[in-house]
Image (spheres, coloured by chain):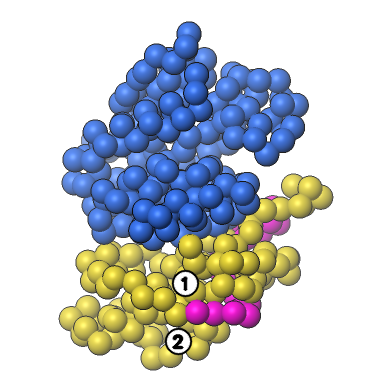
Chain colours: A yellow, B blue
Amino acid sequence: ANMILLTHNMMVSPMKEASKTLPLKIEAEEVQELEKEFNLVFLVKIIDRLDWAGFLEASAILNQQGLPSSTEEIDKTNEESMRKLHHALMEVDVVTGALVCTETGRRFPIAGGIPNMLLNQDEL
Amino acid sequence: YEPAEDTFLFMDALQEELPFLMEREPRTVLELGCGSGCVTAFLAQHLRGATFFASDINPHALQAARRVFDANKVEVELFQADLLSAWRPRGNIDVLLFNPPYVPTPKEEMTSSWIARSWAGGDRGREVVDRIFPSLQEHLSAGGCLYMVALDSNDPHDIASEMSARGFRTKVVKKRKAGIEFLLILKIWRRLQA
């Protein structure tokens, strides 16, 4: 169980004031690199689902460089660049840190690779 | 009835649904209220090519699920959340799995303890599951489907008609007698546009 960038991309702030459209900002304390099976078919299909700008922003925070600046620039036949994309999306794990709601400033802690997105009683 | 009965029924139903699921080539599978994670672990072993996500409100459940996933050598992305509250509503879910707290109980019982939260479903046993129906249209992908556990007492016909009004079909894919009740596995998926 890991907080990888694919998971981050699927999530939004649960705060009732938040728009449900913006990515959460990553604060990374402890990060580890994993090894996950490279599946080009899956990768190509999941690209359509991503908020690409949010992914790039989060990748930069985790020091993943050299990613295409838009989905149009992705060359699916270039194995090296696809493997780089796979690595950034699936293999960089934020073990400790936080996901921050940019609209309210609320921090959702990540511990043991698990983000805690629960609201407090007074936020419900 | 034993709590584990519904898990086994759920797994049996998903086993039978595998041809349907494999044909759809899902990319994202999410289990809400995953508990110990058995259902996701099962599906992750049989369905290739998808990323599996599982969430629960209970931190102890998440730790148990993590152990189950490790023991079964499946990779599942875990997070702690209240249902779909932190999930981006952008048609990102191909298969949604939910074994909700479905037992009809007084409202107070729903939050009386961690363990009660796993089975106490309030009025008609519907108060938790009802929270995900309104946003299903935004969360399920075009070919996406929800599989959920229900009791007869949850009024599945009412669920079917509520979801029909939203453009979804509902089917009981499996059913088993449990004590004096029937446990059901419902499948809810988008009606195809004509």
> Is A25 within the magenta?
yes
Mark 1 chain: A
- The relative height of residue A1 versus residue B177 in the rendered view (above or below) is below
- The relative height of residue B191 versus residue A72 in the rendered view (above or below) is above
The span shown in magenta is: A13-32
- The relative height of residue A25 versus residue B163 in the rendered view (above or below) is below
Q: Position of residue B106 (x, y in %)?
A: 70, 20
Q: Position of residue B22 (x, y in %)?
A: 21, 47
N-terminal of the two: label 2 or label 1? 1
Q: Tell me, yes or no, if residue A47 can be seen here.
A: yes
Viewer-proximal residue among B140 and B18: B18
Does residue B173 appear to the left or right of B66 in the view shown?
left
Do residues under tags 2 and 1 come within 8 Å of each other at their CB atoms?
yes
Toward the right, the furthest residue is A122
Quarter of the image that includes the C terminus of chain B: top left
- Kind of residue sitting beneath label 1: Leu
Q: Secondary structure at mark 1?
A: helix
Label 1 Cα crowd, 10 Å radius (few <14 / some 14-19 / many 20+): many
- Kind of residue sitting beneath label 2: Gln
Residue hosting label 2: A64
Q: Secondary structure at mark 2?
A: loop
| Residue at (63, 57) in percent of width and height | A117
Q: Place residue A90 in its image quadrant.
A: bottom left
Residue hosting label 1: A5
Viewer-proximal residue among B91 and A123: A123
| Residue at (37, 79) in percent of width and height | A87
User: Could you tell me how far apart the alpha carbons at marks 2 and 1 are, in whole angstroms?
Assistant: 11 Å
Label 2 Cα crowd, 10 Å radius (few <14 / some 14-19 / many 20+): some
